[in-house]
Image (cartoon, helix red, strand yellow):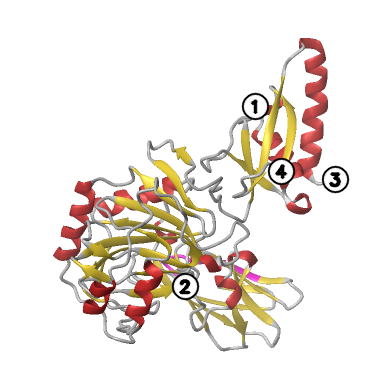
């Protein structure tokens, strides 16, 4: 019997005896799978058992986790359940809590006093009312305009995880606001809203501030990243233990006269005139033709912006959407684009939050003081070795005497394993050491 089953049943037997002696009460709990709106199971626990987090986790795992896998019990805000909440979510220990959508228009008041309002169920799209103030929005614009270094200042938007590659399908300008007071406050708030236990800057790209002038747009795309060169595919696949962008918090920093919506072209336009965030205006064809080139992707995109699911820009509005399903797979319907601005100027910002620290270090700030390029060299003769990050994500194959170089962070752990999964050597990288050697007996000093 696995340890947590033994713990649960042991606690239950002891508490049954206590309850018979003291006639203590019992509680009925509704258990949901991660991100689910429909109840998976109903369980009953004594008040005494509810005081044991391990017992609650075990009971929830049995009730709602696939194949009885070990899960954590989380409350409706994604926080660890310290007692028996009426509504509990079973979150696998290698996954992140994902908010259920319930139904379009559903509102959930968060502990931070913000309100999460469901705008769509597929993709998982929410408005976060009260996330930022108008003063925050204006300050972010000032912060972006004040940046003068070539790497992060406001300039034509590029694509790709590193370097500067101007894009023909992204005509906006962007700046990377890294550590100003307002940027750090909003990044921490995003982690809090998502139910993370703590803020970790290694799990967020920098705050990107965007400026779209008239006719500027960004073609529909996924925020979920493809695998960079030199990184194993599994390392970027959360469904297999890897890391990628889980969710995007998108901020609108100004009103826009016309256009500039965020459109989800694979989702239909809901008939909800009561939800002001969802654009319900009628396309102005004459304005579209005056602003966008004939037979251009921008002109074709405008049609989607007025017929598909789209969020209207508004000063201090914030939205949240998930790029991953609760099981870590890519949500294809999260594909989205920045609609052409037809009149006025659009200012916005986005923050990408990862399910785990990035396997290749920060894609935007490689000079981060905790960033390390670690080098691993095998001095044996085996040809079936691979290097793994955090013991589960394969980062690459190992060739004898040929260094394997990985961008990582202080404190990250790596293990060299055989093709059968047997560990040969394990390392915890540090700022004081960047080169590691090993043979069949383990690490070499």
Q: Position of residue 139 (x, y in %)?
A: 18, 53
Q: Which residue is tagged 2?
A: 360
Give the distance between the C-alpha atoms of the residues marked 3 and 1, in whole angstroms.
23 Å
- Please give the label number shown on residue 83: none
Q: Earlier in the sequence, mark 1 or mark 4?
A: 4
433 left or right of 397 in image: left
Q: Nearer the viewer, residue 151 or 390?
A: 151
Residues at marks 1 and 2 touching, judged by CB atoms closer than 8 Å = no
Q: Which residue is tagged 4?
A: 40
Q: Is residue 427 magenta?
A: yes
Q: Quadrant of residue 22?
A: top right
Secondary structure, mark 3, is loop
Q: Position of residue 25 (x, y in %)?
A: 72, 17
- Please give the label number shown on residue 51: 1
Q: Quadrant of residue 362?
A: bottom left
Q: Earlier in the sequence, mark 1 or mark 2?
A: 1
Circle 4 residues within 10 Å: few <14, some 14–19, many ≥20: some
Q: Earlier in the sequence, mark 2 or mark 3?
A: 3
Give the distance between the C-alpha atoms of the residues marked 2 and 3, in whole angstroms.
39 Å
Q: Earlier in the sequence, mark 3 or mark 1?
A: 3
Q: Is residue 51 magenta?
A: no
Q: Which residue is tagged 3?
A: 1
Give the distance between the C-alpha atoms of the residues marked 1 and 4, in whole angstroms.
23 Å
Q: Which residues are magenta?
A: 425-434
Give the distance between the C-alpha atoms of the residues marked 1 and 2, in whole angstroms.
40 Å
Question: From the viewer's perspective, is residue 443 above or below residue 277?
Answer: below
């Amino acid at each position: 019997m696995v340890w947590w089953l033994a713990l649960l049943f042991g606690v239950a037997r002891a508490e049954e005896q206590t309850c018979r002696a003291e006639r203590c009460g019992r509680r009925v709990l509704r258990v949901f799978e991660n991100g689910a709106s429909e109840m998976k199971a109903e369980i009953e626990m004594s008040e005494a058992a509810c005081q044991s987090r391990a017992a609650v986790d075990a009971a929830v795992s049995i009730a709602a986790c696939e194949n009885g896998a070990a899960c954590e019990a989380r409350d409706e805000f994604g926080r660890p359940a310290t007692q028996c909440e009426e509504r509990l979510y079973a979150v696998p220990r290698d996954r992140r809590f994902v908010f259920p959508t319930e139904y379009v228009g559903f509102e959930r008041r968060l502990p931070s006093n913000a309100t999460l309002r469901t705008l769509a169920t597929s993709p998982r799209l929410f408005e976060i009312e009260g996330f930022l103030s108008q003063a925050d929005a204006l300050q972010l614009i000032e912060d972006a305009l004040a940046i003068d270094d070539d790497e992060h200042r406001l300039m034509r938007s590029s694509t790709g995880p590193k370097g500067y590659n101007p894009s023909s399908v992204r005509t906006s300008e962007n700046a990377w606001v890294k550590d100003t007071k307002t940027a750090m406050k909003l990044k921490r708030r995003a982690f809090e809203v998502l139910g993370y236990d703590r803020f970790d800057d290694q799990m967020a790209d920098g705050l990107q501030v965007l400026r779209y002038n008239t006719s500027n747009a960004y073609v529909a795309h996924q925020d979920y990243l493809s695998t960079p060169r030199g990184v194993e595919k599994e390392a970027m696949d959360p469904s297999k233990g890897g890391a990628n962008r889980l969710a995007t918090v998108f901020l609108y920093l100004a009103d826009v006269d016309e256009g500039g919506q965020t459109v989800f072209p694979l989702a239909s336009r809901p008939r909800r005139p009561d939800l002001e965030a969802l654009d319900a205006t009628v396309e102005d064809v004459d304005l579209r033709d005056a602003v966008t080139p004939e037979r251009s992707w921008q002109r074709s995109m405008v049609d989607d912006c007025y017929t598909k699911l789209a969020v209207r820009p508004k000063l201090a509005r914030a939205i949240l959407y998930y790029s991953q399903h609760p099981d870590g797979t890519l949500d294809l319907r999260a594909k989205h684009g920045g609609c052409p601005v037809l009149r006025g100027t659009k200012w916005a910002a986005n923050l990408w939050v990862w399910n785990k620290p990035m396997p290749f270090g920060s894609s935007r700030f490689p000079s981060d003081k905790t960033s390390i390029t670690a080098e691993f060299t095998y001095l044996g003769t085996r040809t079936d070795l691979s290097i793994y990050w955090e013991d589960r994500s394969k980062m690459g194959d190992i060739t004898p005497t040929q260094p394997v170089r990985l961008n990582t962070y202080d404190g990250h752990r790596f293990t060299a394993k055989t093709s059968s999964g047997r560990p040969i050597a394990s390392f915890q990288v540090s700022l004081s050491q960047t080169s590691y050697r090993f043979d069949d007996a383990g690490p070499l000093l």
